[in-house]
Amino acid sequence: MINLDRRYESYLRGTKKLRIDGIEECVKAYGYTDDGKSITGYYVITENHKLFFNNDAQFLRMKELAAVD
C-alpha cells in the first residue's frame, strides 16, 4: 500500500505544489478510496480538483470541485 503521508506531506506544508494543466495548486487533503471490503486506491484534493488514483499510483480521473459562494 502507498504511504500517502510520505508522498504528499510536503505538499500539505506548502513547500511543493501540484501542476494541473499548467497551473500550480496547493494540496488540501488526501486519503484512501475503498469498495467496502478493501482499499482500491487513493485521492488527492487540491484547491480546485479532486484527483483519483489506483493502488499502482496510476491516474484514473479528475473531478473539478464546485466553487463555494
Image (cartoon, grey):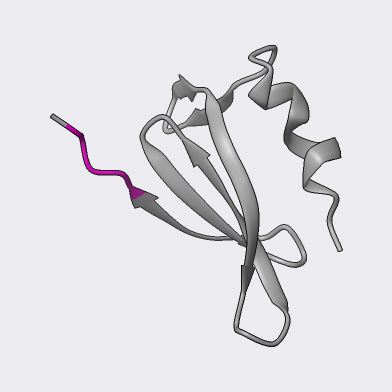
Examine the image and state in which quarter residue 1 appears: bottom right
- Among all residues in the image, which is located at the extreme bottom? 37
- Could you tell me residue 9's position as x and y percent? 76, 29
Q: Is residue 56 above or below residue 20?
A: below
- Among all residues in the image, which is located at the extreme top? 15
- Could you tell me residue 26's position as x and y percent? 52, 23
Residue 65 on the magenta span = yes
Which residue is found at the position 69% from the left and 12% from the top? Answer: 15
| Secondary structure that dominates the magenta span | loop
Examine the image and state in which quarter residue 54 appears: bottom right
In the displayed structure image, the side of residue 24 where residue 18 appears, left or right: right
Which residue is found at the position 19% from the left and 34% from the top? Answer: 68
Q: Is residue 58 above or below residue 13?
A: below
In the displayed structure image, the side of residue 52 where residue 12 appears, left or right: right
- Could you tell me residue 3's position as x and y percent? 85, 50
Q: Is residue 16 above or below residue 52?
A: above
Question: Observer-nearest residue: 38 or 51?
Answer: 38
In the displayed structure image, the side of residue 60 where residue 54 appears, left or right: right
Q: Is residue 19 above or below residue 62?
A: above
- Could you tell me residue 27's position as x and y percent? 56, 30
**Count of all numbered marks drawn on residues in the image:** 0
Which residue is found at the position 80% from the left and 39% from the top? Answer: 5
In the displayed structure image, the side of residue 67 where residue 36 appears, left or right: right
Quadrant of the image for the C terminus?
A: top left
Residue 61 on the magenta span = no
Which residue is found at the position 73% from the left and 82% from the top? Answer: 38
User: Magenta segment, which residues?
Assistant: 64-68
